[in-house]
Image (cartoon, coloured by chain):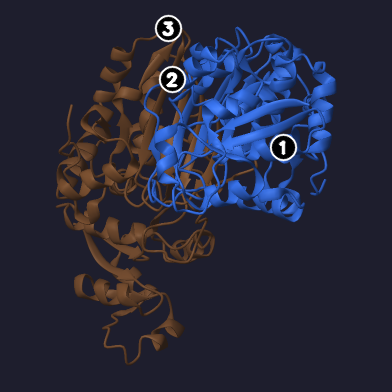
Chain colours: A blue, B brown
Amino acid sequence: MLKVGINAYGTIGKRVADAITKQDDIEVVGVVKAHPNYMSYVASKRFKLFVPNNSALKSFENTGIKIEGTLENLMDDSELIVDSTPEGLGEEYKKIYERRKKKAIFQGGEDHELTNLSFNAYANYKEAWGKDFVRVVSCNTTGLIRTLNPLTEFGNIKVRANLVRRATDPDDYSKGPINSIVPELKIPSHHGPDVASVIKGLDIQTMAVKVPTTLMHLHFVNVTFPSETKVEDIISKWKEYRRIAFVSGKDGVKSTSQLMDIGRESGRERSDLFEIMLWKDSVSVKGKELFYYQAVHQESDVVPENIDAIRSMFQLKDKQDSIDKTDKTLRIGELVYGR
Amino acid sequence: MLKVGINAYGTIGKRVADAITKQDDIEVVGVVKAHPNYMSYVASKRFKLFVPNNSALKSFENTGIKIEGTLENLMDDSELIVDSTPEGLGEEYKKIYERRKKKAIFQGGEDHELTNLSFNAYANYKEAWGKDFVRVVSCNTTGLIRTLNPLTEFGNIKVRANLVRRATDPDDYSKGPINSIVPELKIPSHHGPDVASVIKGLDIQTMAVKVPTTLMHLHFVNVTFPSETKVEDIISKWKEYRRIAFVSGKDGVKSTSQLMDIGRESGRERSDLFEIMLWKDSVSVKGKELFYYQAVHQESDVVPENIDAIRSMFQLKDKQDSIDKTDKTLRIGELVYGR
């Protein structure tokens, strides 16, 4: 059993921790929380709880939360750290992991340059093979790669995608916007270059706005193929990939709210949608161009990618075996919906 | 003075009525309200108030609101009716206007086929010259035409635009979405063909989603030119058109909320933004492609178009004279913002 520490138990970290408990070749040694709060209580009931450093120990005194030690202690027992600390902290933590000779996975909030290896299981599993530091790309970038990577099999494609981003996560009461649309004025947004850091050489431009919702991101995608391509062929190609799930307006699935409801009603923990949800009845072809909508559950789509990245970094399984195992344990491919 | 009746005094109707009072060649004879409510009180203090028909008269009894008569009476004194009735009623009303031999302007909620003449002052003022029935295109279509029509001067362009639509207007407490993104699954959305009904033959595809905000629509626009074009040349071209206003993230204008605040702080009635608001610092060129964001105040951008349509239909003024007069009276071109 490969021993993994989770730093920290936040939106991504807690989900990766749970996903690891479902694997038989990887285990969670412990998780890190920096501050005592309700999630620290929850974490301490499920995993051995650690804090980032000695000064953080003090804040947990008299809370009744049992702390096993610091990140240094967690690293004693860990072969790899899943770093899911807040955006921008990765650089400092990487130095710590390097000093302790621990492998680490970082999340998409960090820059590509932190690891020089941005990861998506479908697109470049083998690139992470045996590597020490890997960055799993962000939720939106993962979403784009999931549906675009299969399309590269049709030849050199050109992608123009516009992202409608959720304002913040459902547990966050403090951020906006609440009645406004906020464009990312820098064009391209970082998502396009980020996709191209995984699908090398892809011609992709992205723009993005933030809107007042907490549930999911939604993408407008426009792909130009070298030659005319049929809707059926595109859908058949996508169907080879379990981490893409199709939904249909015909079944009443007309919004991101209903997508999340599919997660709840399909018995998913936290109603998570690890799959990229793609509206089949939006898939349209005009000449050499393809248009479609997809939605991304920002809290969970990168979770299976983290699991596969671990296996590649420790050469535990080959690409398809790892993906199959991850998908089976997380019940990816079993969502209950319509046609 | 050309005599105009307004049917009905809603979001667009009340604004067109106000805009007409600022003209010296057109006047409002009266306005129609179907139901007694707070807006009927407001309307009755400002204009002669009419109701659609005899049965509606009854609902105004004992309200203290003075009713001058029915739509038939209003038509006695009107040379033209601005029809701003709810979407889909235009067809029935058109028969009434035809029977009374009154010219009429319809709004973008109606189909192009109702009049076979869709109007935008910049793009096809002369087409409405002397015509009996004209349709002013919707707020979003107007927004797209305003910035795209100038770009057609660079040659045959290809347009791919994605619309992020406000859920409903600020006075409407009843509609959603409130925490969801709702894609228009039919691709293209009606906006593309609608733009092409005015800019004939334009290669345009549009997609659209609805999001939880009431203030404005926002557009992602991607234009492909026949050859490489410079940002400065594009902006210079747009600057020839007063109904496009530039804003900049550098001045802190980063959202639709701040755009509406510019309207309020510039002394605009109802904080209306008749102009299409275009983020200058988003305007980007990559090869032959152009990318930009613009925002549309759905309640008011079509108001100046209604005024110009009236002038064209009665051959009161030539295109530029009408636009200049409308803009001067509505203070278009005088918004106070930054660089």
Q: x, y percentage for residue A134?
A: 61, 16
Q: Which label sits in the foreground, 1 or 2? A: 2
Relative to B48, residue A160 above or below: above
Which disc number belongs to residue A19? 1
- Give left or right: position of B217 versus A204: left
Q: Can you identify the residue that label 2 sits on?
A: A92
Mark 2: amino acid: Glu
**Which chain letter matches label 1?**
A
Query: Is label 3 or label 2 in front?
Result: 2
Q: Quadrant of the N terminus of chain A?
A: top right
Disc 1 from disc 3: Cα separation: 50 Å
Q: Looking at the picture, which amino acid does disc 3 mark?
A: Glu
Residue A122 visible:
yes
The picture places residue B244, in percent across and down from the top left corner, at: 28, 33
Q: Residue at 23%, 47% (x, y): give it.
A: B261
Quarter-of-image position of residue B127: top left
Q: Is residue B127 visible?
A: no
How packed mark 1 is, by other alpha carbons closer than 10 Å (few <14, some 14-19, many 20 or more), is many
SS assignment at label 2: helix
Given residues A264 and B75, the one toward you in this image is: A264
Q: Secondary structure at mark 1?
A: helix
Which quadrant does the C terminus of chain A fall into?
A: top right
| Residue type pointed to by label 1 | Ala
Observer-nearest of B308 and A105: A105
Residue at screen point 77% across, 13% down: A315
Q: Quadrant of residue A186?
A: top left
- Labels 1 and 2 within one chain: yes
Q: Percent x, y for residue A209?
A: 44, 35
What residue sits right under mark 3 in the picture?
A: B228
Q: Residue B58 at x, y = what percent?
A: 41, 88
Work out how far the residue at label 1 is from the one at label 2, CA to CA, in angstroms. Answer: 26 Å
